[in-house]
Image: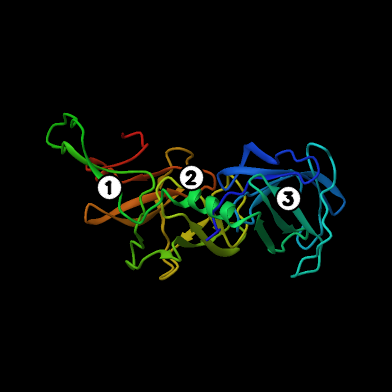
């Protein structure tokens, strides 16, 4: 249940916030730290999404090496007397701004981590804050909007609007099987280097939290996005993202009691999504330029 919650942390020594609002990872403010690994020093930005292992850094991070982390404010190394249960490397602990602590392994590539809230009330507040406004109930509304005057192409005055927070029932446009698993929108993906994994997206409109089983570099498009049932490609080769120019993927979502095409950008960090020109005659996505 804690997956996709953004955890706000602070230095355990000087108690200053480690959150960097100017640098985003997984479309959320990142945890900024100084890092020393394999004889190199630099800065690393870790994802604040619990369950995500994404990061970006100004130095190369080799696999299976133990790193030392320092607070960017007090320049003190962040240490812990606890060991990782998976690989016996030192654990690094941060304090949660809301009370409690989160631990991560200092060995690159090790995915062992844990979060401990100060009390149950704090944990529940996190869950309610991040999930209470999201509902499986369809938030599609009928609105009145003056139609544009176009010859030979009558446009309805009534348009449906898909509001932020709407749960998108999503399907593969090829095999028609559902793409939702464990309340997440699931895709099979492939990077330029051939590495294959799975991408899990929030199924709620305009909620951009996500995680992946492989590391995805920031601001870089995914080479291939497939249905995890039939493995058909979802990339539309003849269409590009109007916001960043990257390739886009097409899925089917339920709206207006029928299936419509829904497009998402393949570039990590780009939040563009849209509908086909035909569906835009009858449906509006809340916060889209069409509205």
- Find the distance from the CA under tag 3 to the CA under tag 2: 37 Å
Along the line of sight, the residue nearer the viewer: 173 or 4: 4
Which percent across, then down, holds residue 142?
21, 42
Badge 1 local density, few (<14 within 10 Å), some, or many (20+)? Answer: some
Q: Nearer the viewer, residue 276 or 101?
A: 101
Q: Which residue matches tag 3? A: 94
| CB contact under 8 Å: marks 3 and 1 | no
Q: Residue at x 27, y 47 (%)?
A: 140
Earlier residue among tags 3 and 1: 3
- Of the numbered discs in the image, which one, if any, rests on residue 246? 2
Q: Is residue 89 above or below residue 239?
A: below
Which quadrant of the structure image shows residue 80?
Answer: bottom right
Residue occupying the point 60% across, 63% down: 195
Q: Which mark is residue 140?
A: 1
Evaluate whether residue 220 shows in this view. Answer: yes
Where is residue 278 shown, x and y percent of the image? 24, 45
| Tag 3–tag 2 contact (CB < 8 Å) | no
Q: Is residue 196 left or right of residue 231?
A: right
* Secondary structure type for disc 2: loop
Q: Are marks 1 and 2 in contact (CB under 8 Å)?
A: no
Residue 222 seen in render: no
Badge 2: residue crowd in 10 Å (few <14, some 14–19, many ≥20): some
Q: In the shown orientation, is residue 39 left or right of residue 142?
A: right
**Residue 270 badge:** none
In this picture, is 161 found above or below 84?
above
| SS class, disc 1 | strand
């Amino acid at each position: 249940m804690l997956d996709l919650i953004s955890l706000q942390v602070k230095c355990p020594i000087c108690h200053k916030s480690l959150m960097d609002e100017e640098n985003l990872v997984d479309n959320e403010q990142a945890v900024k730290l100084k890092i020393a690994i394999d004889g190199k020093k630099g800065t690393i930005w870790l994802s604040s999404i619990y369950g995500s292992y994404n990061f970006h850094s100004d130095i190369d991070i080799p696999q299976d090496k133990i790193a030392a982390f320092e607070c960017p404010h007090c320049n003190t190394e962040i240490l812990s007397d606890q060991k990782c249960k998976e690989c016996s490397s030192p654990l690094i602990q941060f304090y949660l701004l809301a009370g409690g602590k989160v631990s991560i392994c200092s060995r690159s590539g090790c995915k062992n981590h844990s979060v401990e809230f100060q009390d149950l009330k704090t944990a529940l507040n996190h869950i309610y804050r991040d999930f209470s406004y999201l509902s499986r109930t369809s938030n599609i509304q009928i609105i009145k909007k003056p139609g544009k005057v176009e010859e030979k192409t009558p446009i309805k005055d009534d348009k449906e609007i898909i509001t932020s927070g709407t749960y998108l029932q999503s399907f593969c446009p090829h095999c028609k099987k559902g793409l939702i698993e464990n309340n997440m929108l699931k895709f099979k993906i492939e990077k330029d280097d051939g590495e294959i994994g799975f991408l899990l997206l929030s199924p709620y409109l305009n909620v951009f939290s996500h995680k992946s089983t492989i590391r995805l570099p920031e601001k870089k498009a995914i080479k291939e996005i497939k249905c995890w049932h039939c493995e058909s490609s979802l990339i539309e080769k003849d269409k590009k993202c109007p916001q960043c120019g990257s390739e886009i993927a097409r899925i089917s979502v339920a709206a207006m009691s029928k299936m419509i095409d829904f497009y998402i950008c393949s570039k990590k960090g780009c939040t563009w999504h849209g509908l086909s020109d035909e569906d835009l005659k009858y449906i509006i996505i809340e916060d889209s330029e069409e509205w």
